[in-house]
């Protein structure tokens, strides 16, 4: 019997320490299901090694890594528990294991050593004694015995392996060993065969190599147009509308092969939007991939063509556009290139093979560098002072990445890899990192900058930092909080203040790990007002506008007084507000104002302007960058938007797109934004849903640096004349 609300279940794995549980402790690697969340902790049910529920517990949010139900079931069958975390630390392998299909070739750890095998079935292990239990998942694998001397064993059962026993998922077109026989035996590790049941046969996803063999046998070849299409291609096709006539639909090819009862090549598409009559990835009773309901469409491959929205050349020439890397035109120059002027950004940066080329888990680094240095001057004036004492690492950053990006609009992966190899840790060349980890390393050890933020706590101690993690009180926020509200709530509830206006404020959105988001959407604040977050600043009364003398944390949560916004009052207004019976328990505190501050009107507002947003979705980072003062001057950057060739010999194709619709959306009044979310474009939705780090900088500094840059360029042109 399945649990109710199964689709809403949230699972996790404990990544460190001990869980504070009601019955028994949970060590690293323990898997649980979230029952509730309160004050940074998860109230959960913990599972034993057999999948049975062993009791309740409480785990800190930062100690829990989110999992899907399928991932949790696969990891439960892995033992001992610390092996689960080892598997998770290799996201490429674990992701491939989660997507295994029938007849996929894998390398498994067996009692006789490493052996190749073919995945045959997904198996459900254990008994669900209570609705709270979680059944484990394993794979039935047909081992390929390459020893010619040993006769093949003929036993009725196939070996059962866990996700932890699979050390490699081989490409679909990998050749099988020439001399092999199948070996059948049950490797159940003490599990009763009656506790094992087949869920279903995995879909038979035929590889492209097998399709080619079949096509040659039939004496036919696919047209050149269709040979350019592959899994992951963006395609379009014409279909008949219910009201009559033909319409064009768009989607991504998720599967390609020959379905049962068919003889020609077909494609499984995940459409951009829901269409009645479509499925969630099934066709003819067989599952070929997973997607949202009413989005999977299966059609003959011959009806598909490359998506014309992203092609400027005829469809037949698409495959040849990116068959070779662009030539290396890099010439080292003495002078540093200034940020790209707004009038030149689109001509230099927009298009494919533009920006920074991604390679081998580098998207976090590519998105960060593009955001900070393509058109922004946020850090230019700060790291210029380190030029006289620069080392090899800073030299590569300035000459091979920043200068090349600003002058040629493209940085090849080789230059970025040279930079990664100099960062002092081998993991920077192979593994995916968090952007905040890289930002701290970049600013502290590469650019040798002092911390950008000086934050004063209530105990009058000052802490230095390069980034700030927002920790708001979720229950006091609306369904679409702004960064302004989140920052103010976090500062006031934690009793924090800026000692000075930061040169650049990099704000980490409230989320745990890369999966769980505290808010489904966050609205960027194009202008961030930090006046009320400054220590010793002259502030104005929330109600009357006169000079404020008191600040109240209790009023932050008051739903009648704009909840989530900082409230400060003059003495008169504070007395009136707190005379209400529901606010009599509030304890306003006196604001700190420097003795030499003049009396009278409040000081001008201290504003920061948003210039970049890093986003993450399924461990892939992209960025939105504002490249000029104009409202619609926004770019979208993806260092791995496409790929040319295979994993061994191919390369990533970066892409930069103009996205003026982002500026149009953000320029609307806040009260209208909450209503029109359903009609926004895909990039706007991505900005709101996947926000990870937002970067504003002081507006006056930005304008002054722009003026100085343009004056310098004009004087250089006059000297050349």
Image: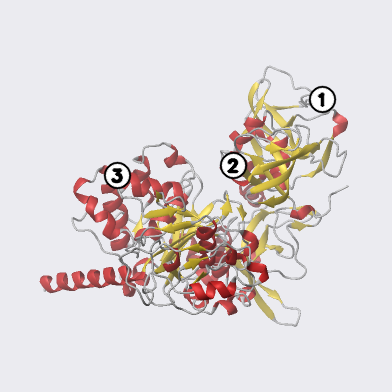
Residue 640 in sight from this viewpoint: no
Depth check: give the residue in front, 155 or 683: 683
The mark that comes first in sequence, 1 or 2, is: 1
Q: CA distance from mark 1 to mark 2?
A: 28 Å
| Residue beneath disc 1 | 155
The mark that comes first in sequence, 1 or 3, is: 1
> Residue 150: x percent and y percent?
70, 17
Which residue does the image show at 54% across and 79% down from the upper left? 669
> Residue 449: x percent and y percent?
31, 50
> Residue 389: x percent and y percent?
21, 45
> Residue 99: x percent and y percent?
66, 46
Which residue does the image show at 57% across and 72% down from the upper left? 681
Q: Looking at the rendered structure, which numbered label has been put on residue 473?
A: none
* Residue 674 placement: quadrant: bottom right
| Residue beneath disc 2 | 171
Q: CA distance from mark 3 to mark 2?
A: 36 Å
- How many other residues sit within 10 Å of disc 1, few (<14), some (14-19) or many (≥20)? few
């Amino acid at each position: 019997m399945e649990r109710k609300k199964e689709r809403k279940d949230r699972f996790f794995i404990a990544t460190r320490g001990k869980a504070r549980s009601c019955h028994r402790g949970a060590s690293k690697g323990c898997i649980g299901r979230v029952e509730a969340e309160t004050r940074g902790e998860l109230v959960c049910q913990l599972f034993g090694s057999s999948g049975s529920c062993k009791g309740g517990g409480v785990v800190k949010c930062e100690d829990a890594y989110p999992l899907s139900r399928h991932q949790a079931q696969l990891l439960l069958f892995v033992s001992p528990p610390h092996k689960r975390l080892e598997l998770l630390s290799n996201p490429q392998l674990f992701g491939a294991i989660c997507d295994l299909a029938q007849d996929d070739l894998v390398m498994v750890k067996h009692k006789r050593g490493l052996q190749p095998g073919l995945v045959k079935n997904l198996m459900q292990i254990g008994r669900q004694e209570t609705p709270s239990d979680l059944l484990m998942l394993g794979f039935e694998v047909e081992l390929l015995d390459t020893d010619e001397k040993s006769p093949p064993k003929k036993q009725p059962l196939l070996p059962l392996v866990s996700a932890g026993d699979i050390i490699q998922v081989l490409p679909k077109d990998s050749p099988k060993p020439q001399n092999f026989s199948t070996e059948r035996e049950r490797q159940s590790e003490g599990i009763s065969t009656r506790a094992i049941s087949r869920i279903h046969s995995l879909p038979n996803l035929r590889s492209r190599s097998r399709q080619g063999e079949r096509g040659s046998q039939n004496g036919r070849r696919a047209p050149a147009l269709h040979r350019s299409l592959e899994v992951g291609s963006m395609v379009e096709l014409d279909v008949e509308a219910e009201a009559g006539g033909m319409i064009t639909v768009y989607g991504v090819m998720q599967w390609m092969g020959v379905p049962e009862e068919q003889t020609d090549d077909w494609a499984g598409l995940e459409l951009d939007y829901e269409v009645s009559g479509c499925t969630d990835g099934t066709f003819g009773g067989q599952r070929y991939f997973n997607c949202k309901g009413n989005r999977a469409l299966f059609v003959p491959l011959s009806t598909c063509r490359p998506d014309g929205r992203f092609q400027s050349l005829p469809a037949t020439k698409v495959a040849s556009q990116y068959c070779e890397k662009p030539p290396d035109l890099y010439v080292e120059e003495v002078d540093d290139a200034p940020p790209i002027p707004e009038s030149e950004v689109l001509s230099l940066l927009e298009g494919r093979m533009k920006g920074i080329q991604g390679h081998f888990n580098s998207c976090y680094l590519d998105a960060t560098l593009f955001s900070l240095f393509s058109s922004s001057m946020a850090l230019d004036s700060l790291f210029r002072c380190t030029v006289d004492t620069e080392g090899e690492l800073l030299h590569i950053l300035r000459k091979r990445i920043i200068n090349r990006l600003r002058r040629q609009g493209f940085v090849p992966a080789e230059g970025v890899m040279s930079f990664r190899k100099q960062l002092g840790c081998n993991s920077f060349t192979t593994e995916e990192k968090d952007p905040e980890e890289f930002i701290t390393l970049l600013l502290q050890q590469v650019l040798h900058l002092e911390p950008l933020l000086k934050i004063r706590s209530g105990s009058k101690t000052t802490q230095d930092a390069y980034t700030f993690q927002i920790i708001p009180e979720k229950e006091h926020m609306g369904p679409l909080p702004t960064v302004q509200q989140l920052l103010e709530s976090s500062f006031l509830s934690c009793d924090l203040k800026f000692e000075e206006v930061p040169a650049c404020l990099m704000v980490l959105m409230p989320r745990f790990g890369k999966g769980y988001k505290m808010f489904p959407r966050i609205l960027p604040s194009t202008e961030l007002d930090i006046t009320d977050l400054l220590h010793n600043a002259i502030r104005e009364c929330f109600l009357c506008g006169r000079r404020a003398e008191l600040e109240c944390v209790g009023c932050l949560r008051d739903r009648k007084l704009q909840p989530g916004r900082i409230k400060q009052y003059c003495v008169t207004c504070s007395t009136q507000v707190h005379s209400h019976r529901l606010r009599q328990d509030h304890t306003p505190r006196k604001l700190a104002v420097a003795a030499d501050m003049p009396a009278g009107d409040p000081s001008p507002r201290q504003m920061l302007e948003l210039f970049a947003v890093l986003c993450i979705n399924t461990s892939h980072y992209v960025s939105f960058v504002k490249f000029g003062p104009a409202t619609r001057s926004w770019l979208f950057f993806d260092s791995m938007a496409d790929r040319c060739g295979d994993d061994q010999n191919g390369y990533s194709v970066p892409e930069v797109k103009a996205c003026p619709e982002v500026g149009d959306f953000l320029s609307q009044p806040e009260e209208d934004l909450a209503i029109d979310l359903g009609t926004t474009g895909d990039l706007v939705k991505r900005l709101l849903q996947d926000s990870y780090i937002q970067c504003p900088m002081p507006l006056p500094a930005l304008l002054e640096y722009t003026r100085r840059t343009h004056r310098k360029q004009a004087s250089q042109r006059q000297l050349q004349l």
